[in-house]
Image: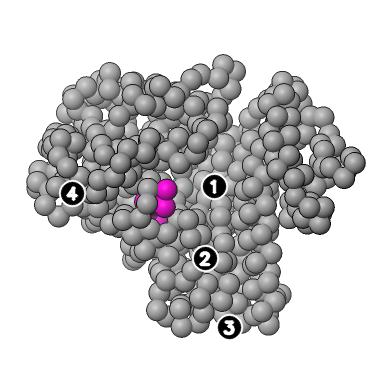
Amino acid sequence: MTDASLRLFKPLLTAEEAFPALEQEFLAAKHEVIAGFRIFDPSTKLRSPSAKAIGDTWFDLIADTLGRGVKITLIISDFDPVVRMNNHIYTWTCLRRLYAAAEASGAPHLLQACAAMHPAKVGFLPRLLLWPRTAKEMRKNLAEVNEKPLVERQAFLKRAPRLAPLLTWKSDQLVPRTFPPPLIPVTHHQKLAVFDNERLYIGGLDLNDRRYDTPIHQQHAPDTWHDTQVLVDGPVAQEATDHLRSFLRTVLGEPPLSQKLLLRTISAKRRVSFPFLSPKPVVRTLAAAHAEQIAQSQTLIYLETQFFRDRKLARQLAERASQNPALSLILILPAAPEGAAFEDEPGSDVAYGEHLQVKCIKILRDAFGARAFIGSPAQPRAIPPDGRATHYGAPIVYLHAKVSIFDDRCGIISSANLNGRSFAWDTEAGIATQNAAEVAHLKSRCFAHWLGPAADPACYNDKTACDTWAAQAALNAQMRPEDRKGLILPYSAAEAEALGYNLPGVPDEMV
């Protein structure tokens, strides 16, 4: 799974580093850009001086790239229009902006863009059982739409093209047409772009202004966003191109490509879906790579993830901890998921996710004991309490990165969270390096970001890192935010446990 011939390996922490790098790759492309993102919004501001010389937003950069004769193939994710209505509308808004940029370029024929909906659908039986909840969600969304003037309701149908066929008019009100409506449990969650089949930009970061943050994370908590991308070259770039050209056929049921370097998750629609909530897992090399590296780990496993909800992965880590008393673990999580930190009424999916994460963390703590440190970042400034948007008296830093490092041997950067959804259902992509210098560079960048410049050198030693990270976090928790070293604090599962609850019959992979 390692591309031994990499000449370029450049980790990019936060959008302040990643967005300008992506802009430069578009500017430097000579023949073709092919990409797949969950979100790619052409209204996103440009950040680098050379890109800003062209215009203000990605609309201008897309138009310029096409105008230079560079072909762009872009697949963005579409979402279930019933339960993710706003996401669905946003996708099609972005798609229209892309084609408007193509028209402005003078070379619209060079753009191939689509909003890709995963073809796997929830089977009729679970849809029937879920109908009361689905109907409630639809009534809520439509009530808001139906309060608007008629002309806006008519425009709404055009902005939600895959929802419109599910609705009809009744006395000038929009109402559901079908019973029960189709439901899509899966999405394309990957974030990667390939330039001239030579360079690959890949990781956990989508493109819009919501994702923009800097390494010092000084924005309001709901505006923070920590993520990691990496820019690499070598044969893995060709594999990524092949993946992007083929995965839409794979999810329909064609055999997947066999790839050695690009790590992926791909699922496909089932031939018979009647009793199933889930798609059919097809490619699970991201999960397999994590299992393989856990089994070989000797001294330290370091994980950054938005979610830690995969009980199978937790048990793999626990088993390795019991086999190897010298192994320690550092796990960095956001203090709370977005839905719990920034929304007034967290949904049942948020509560179920918190339930699973509490279970997984208990498995880890029972197995590792003091050999595990679980931390969460917060800004070095005090604010009044604001629910789970604050952590130890400071605004949280929302962590979205997906980085796994095993000893000094292997580093994985991907779009996959450590949950069943990313390891079995959603379309995901990542890369691994086993080049010692690259692993060391990735680890140094990740560690320094959270620890700050004044960290004890023992924080960087695999044998002492867990204890010294835990000590620094514990000391930070006792200090005023302005006096803390770095951004790291202990993670607390108490609020997650208070919010979380089980949803019997719902698979872990749903969240």
- Checking the image for residue 275, the label placed there is none
Give the image location of residue 34, x and y in percent: 57, 64
Q: Which residue does the numbered mark 1 point to in the structure image? A: 189
User: Dot 3, how many residues are within 10 Å of its Cα: few (below 14), some (14-19), or many (20+)?
Assistant: some
Check the image and name the residue furthest to the top.
504
Q: Which residue is mark 2?
A: 44
Residue occupying the point 58% across, 22% down: 506
Report which residue position mark 4 lands on.
482
Say which label, 3 or 2, has the lower sequence index.
Answer: 2
Magenta span includes 496: no
Who comes first in sequence, dot 3 or dot 4?
3
The first of marks 1 and 3 along the sequence is 3
**Residue depicted at 75% across the width and 23% down the height:** 128
Locate residue 229, reporting x and y percent: 40, 56
N-term-proximal mark, 2 vs 4: 2
Q: Amino acid at mark 1?
A: His
Mark 4 residue element: helix
Q: Which segment is the magenta one?
A: 222-231
Seen from the viewer's position, the closer of residues 477 and 505 is 477
Q: CA distance from mark 1 to mark 3?
A: 30 Å
Residue at (50% x, 73% y) in the render: 26
Please report whichever mark, 4 or 1, sits nearer to the chain's N-terminal start: 1
Query: Residue at image x 45%, y 23%?
Result: 500
* Closer-to-camera residue (70/306): 306
Q: Position of residue 89 (x, y in %)?
A: 67, 52
Does 96 sit above or below residue 137? below
| In-front residue for pair 481/412 | 481
Q: Amino acid at mark 3?
A: Arg
Q: Nearer the viewer's eye, disc 3 or disc 2?
A: 2
**Which residue is denoted by mark 3 in the rendering?**
68
- Whether the residues at callouts 4 and 1 have beta carbons within 8 Å, the answer is no
- Residue 368 lies left or right of residue 181; in this view the side is left
